[in-house]
Amino acid sequence: MAMTSRERLAATLSHEAPDRVCVGFGGTNVTGISAGAISRLRKALLGDDGYKVKVVEPYQVLGEIDPELREALGIDVIGVMPRNTIFGFPNTDWKPFTLFDGTEVLVPGDFNVTAEPNGDLLIYPQGDTSVPPSGRMPRGGFYFDAICRQEPIDEESLDPADNTEDFAPLTDDDVKWFADEAERAYRGADSGIILTIPGAGFGDIALVPAMWMKRTKGIREIEEWYVSTVARRGYVEKVFEKQLEVALANLRLLVDALGDRVQAAFVTGTDFGTQRGPFIGVQTYRELYKPYHKAVNDFIHEHTLWKTFIHSCGSVVDFIPDFIDAGFDILNPVQCSAAGMDPKALKREFGREITFWGGGVDTQKTLPFGTPDEVYSEVLERIEILGEGGGFVFNAIHNVQANTPTENMLAMFRALRDSA
């Protein structure tokens, strides 16, 4: 018998074979599709030329996969996200905006930009144009880059508290937001549901610049932060200790408020791999990151049935045993093009212990630059390899980019239908 989407995700995460591969686009900020690409895909499938896609993640300019499109594409998972975006404003009070490629979209009311003389766009924390901008989209670009606003570092006065003021306890209104969103998702459809946990991304470099804060203190420059994991190890550990304290307190509130409405939880997006190999040593992961990951995962597993999700790009094959030992149930994005990330080997060695969420098609080469036939073939091959016996949620290797040909996206979803 055909499963509901919620049943399909549950079976997949339990390493049981579902009736067809579970499809997981759009539930998180690392499994999405660019707003421009969604707009073209939607027009091709549904023919509504007047529809404007909502930009629900303005940093990467990811679009909302609305219920009608989700049904048309056979997507099984929806997300429960924090109230505010990475720029610190909520997804409310929608207004029209035109992307550089001419796509007309809707953006949040506090999505306020100004143009540089060279045509670059600047965006502001919490929409406040009276403070320095925190993001820049180059002219003709598709997404924003973080602007470093780090003050000169005085080693004698450097205080770990400066790097933890952005990890705040959830307010009653925050908790109500999560509860209402989870209830809406749970009652509105038989979809699988993934929660994004706020404040548990230890060392997530996308969060270090704190683009949602009007003023930043502490270590906020990307290279300086990475240097600090070695040169200022004690400082970073104190930051993580405080972050863990706040994260666990917030988790207690979320567990009580959301209960079993959620099936999976996005914990962290810290990258440990590059295209050619590990970004850091495995021993550094074990000493610096793993204890905090384990504490969060242990709490979740002790109090809920949620499966925990780690996003870590690149060649992370050497880390997977430690990810599993730290309690992670799901690995994303499964970058099969990176060194050592052969999908057959990954499935053979780790497929019984961890669910692969991603790896379905290469977003560096095949999906944006291949032919529709090449996309179709690669998708079918990955489903056959990674989907055997469950434990595979189909997603591309990271977010689908704005310039991805529409015919290639259609070929990807056609292959998903044909694989059933």
Image: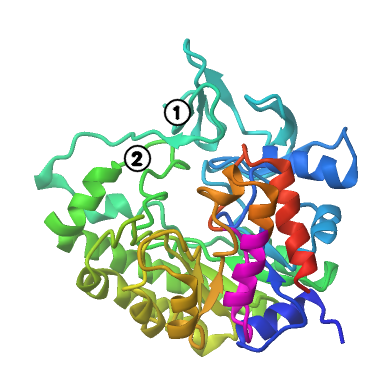
* Magenta-colored span: 377-396
Residue position for label 2: 216
> Label 2 is placed on what type of residue?
Thr
The single residue placed furthest to the top in the displayed view is 117
- Residue 319 coordinates in the image, percent (x, y): 33, 73
Residue at the location (74% across, 65% down)?
A: 416
Task: Judge left or right: residue 343 versus residue 402.
Answer: left
Tell me the amino acid under the disc marked 1: Pro
Identified at 62% across, 53% down, the residue is 32
Residue 64 visible? The answer is no
Residue 384 in the magenta stretch? The answer is yes
Report whether residue 148 is seen: yes
Q: Secondary structure at mark 2?
A: loop
If the image is split into quadrants, where does the C terminus sit? bottom right
Q: Residue furthest left?
A: 156
Q: Circle 1 sits in a helix, a strand or a loop, which is it?
A: loop
Q: Residue at x 77, y 71 (%)?
A: 191
